[in-house]
Amino acid sequence: MKVAFIGTGYVGLVSATAFAEMGNDVTCVDVDQKKVDKLSSGKLTIYEPGLDDLFLRNIRENRLSFTTKLEEAVKKSTILFLTLPTPPQEDGSADLSYVMNVTNQLATLLDSYKLVVTKSTVPVGTADKIRTALEAKGLRSGVHFDVVSNPEFLREGSAVQDFMKPERVVIGTRNPAAAELMRSLYDPFVRNGNPIIVMDERSSELVKYASNGFLAMKISFINEIANLCEAVGADVERVRQGMGKDSRIGSQFLYAGLGYGGSCFPKDVQALARTSKEFDYNFQILKAVMNVNEMQRENLLEKVVERFGDLTGKQFAVWGLAFKPNTDDVREAPALWLIEQLVNRGAKVVAYDPEGLENALRSLKVDIQWAKDRNEVLNNSDALIICTEWNEFRNPDWDVMKSSLNNQIIFDGRNLYDSQRVAELGFEYYSIGRPFIAPTASEKTSIQRAA
Ligand SMILES: NC(=O)c1ccc[n+]([C@@H]2O[C@H](COP(=O)([O-])OP(=O)(O)OC[C@H]3O[C@@H](n4cnc5c(N)ncnc54)[C@H](O)[C@@H]3O)[C@@H](O)[C@H]2O)c1
């Protein structure tokens, strides 16, 4: 099938590559000339595990190409995926301007049957809006089209795996012919028997927001339990294990920490709250979910301030900038908020992230120092703050850490270590929702013995 992706970011590039891998002829459109040039020359613009091999193979086989010319892609393709940004506006609602701008352009470009698919996360009613706009904006007579909702559930960091083997594919359309076309496109991805679920457009649009809202709620819930654990002297890690084994609850998204970030959860929860308000529905849980999430990063900052008092002149090593491991995406990353707070209070920050450094340096509103090595940032720092749970942070070199840091102090926003063991290694270890254990060793020899 001939398919176009309009918007070649995280979702557009991964989905386009996956469809090319299944033998489709895929054209990617983007307004960013530099991005298109880089991709055309065989270089990836994002870090996503497993994407490089698929990407290069499909370029080589001429099934995947890139252009800035929307018209060229529209002419060539029958199925047009909109994978455009829908960022939050001041009032929390999703900014549909990217989607509607492209829709208005499509109205003048469609010259034969096209299936327009919204893969961007869009508010309820967007498919109807696109249909109305296409009809109103001078579409040539006799040209037929369908608008289908097809929300995307991939997770950055495991996006290729998620896309190639989706747990479910949701298709929103009331037209059986359009549903059939979408089914044939997705059938190769669900050979394992996972379902393609067809429903009306509005329900489909809401599935995405409901899913992200629910997952965000799980994160905020366990974070509240963590705060309660700190108050009552319980250990959230134990509570999580005890809860998560209940199959009705499940153990995923049940990790206490700095709260959710990224390009999806914060904006999607806000947009769902906004949609509810527009329809005069008071969605009470969502407000709490958002408040708890804000509070979580503030709690860690408070722990730092409580421990050090005045932060002027203090230096903090930060491990992790990406909003989660295995991605270079730093959008809405708690680490960036925390760093800005530290620097605004007079502290110096030296940061390290395996993949997210470049994006972080572009996004941060304050100056920081950085290093390309996890150990280098520890030198002369007054404490280490862990913001992202990259695997390489799970087993640090405790000797290096102890000799490099000015003080043996760790603030762990992701609960990576066993509190007892770290205390025995001689560190003052502040984590989330777990009892503080006073350090018991301070000599290097005891570190070696305990490790
Ligand atoms: N990132 C995720 O993990 C994820 C997962 C599921 C759904 N989504 C949703 O998918 C959508 C896209 O997200 P993303 O993370 O891929 O965004 P992104 O910012 O990474 O990519 C969007 C791309 O669209 C391009 N673009 C902007 N205007 C354009 C235009 N007029 N024509 C062509 N290209 C244009 C941008 O240059 C950019 O490359 C959003 O609605 C998001 O909520 C994202």
Image (cartoon, helix red, strand yellow):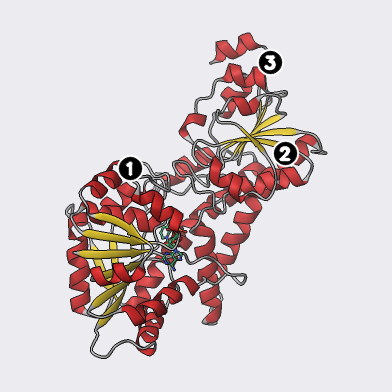
Q: How far apart are marks 3 and 1 (CA)?
A: 45 Å
Task: Count the labels in the image.
Answer: 3
Q: Which amino acid type is marked by label 3?
A: Ser
Q: In this view, does 233 lie above or below 288?
A: above
Q: In the image, is 114 to the left or to the right of 378?
A: left
Work out whether residue 426 can be spotted: no
Q: Can you give x and y, in whole percent of width and height, for residue 26 in the image?
A: 26, 59
Which residue is tagged 3?
A: 442
Q: In the image, is 340 to the left or to the right of 328?
A: right
Q: Can you give x and y, in whole percent of width and height, for residue 426 in the image?
A: 65, 20
Q: Which amino acid type is marked by label 1?
A: Asp
Q: In the image, is 365 to the left or to the right of 1?
A: right
Q: What element carries label 3?
A: loop
Task: Looking at the image, tell me whether mark 1 or mark 2 is earlier in sequence order.
Answer: 1
Q: How far apart are marks 1 and 2 (CA)?
A: 40 Å
Mark 1 crowdedness (10 Å alpha carbons): few <14, some 14-19, many ≥20: some
Q: Nearer the viewer, residue 350 or 409?
A: 350
Is there a contact, CB below 8 Å, between mark 3 and mark 1? no
Residue displayed at 38% across by 82% down: 128
Mark 2 crowdedness (10 Å alpha carbons): few <14, some 14-19, many ≥20: many
Work out whether residue 375 can be spotted: yes
Quarter-of-image position of residue 74: bottom left
On residue 304, which mark appears?
2
Which residue is tagged 1?
A: 52
Q: Can you give x and y, in whole percent of width and height, for residue 285 in the image?
A: 55, 66
Q: Which of 230 and 163 is in front in this view?
A: 163
Ligand 1 is found in the corner quadrant, namely bottom left
Task: Looking at the image, tell me whether mark 3 or mark 2 is earlier in sequence order.
Answer: 2
Task: Looking at the image, tell me whether mark 3 or mark 1 is earlier in sequence order.
Answer: 1
Residue displayed at 70% across by 47% down: 366
Q: What element carries label 2?
A: helix
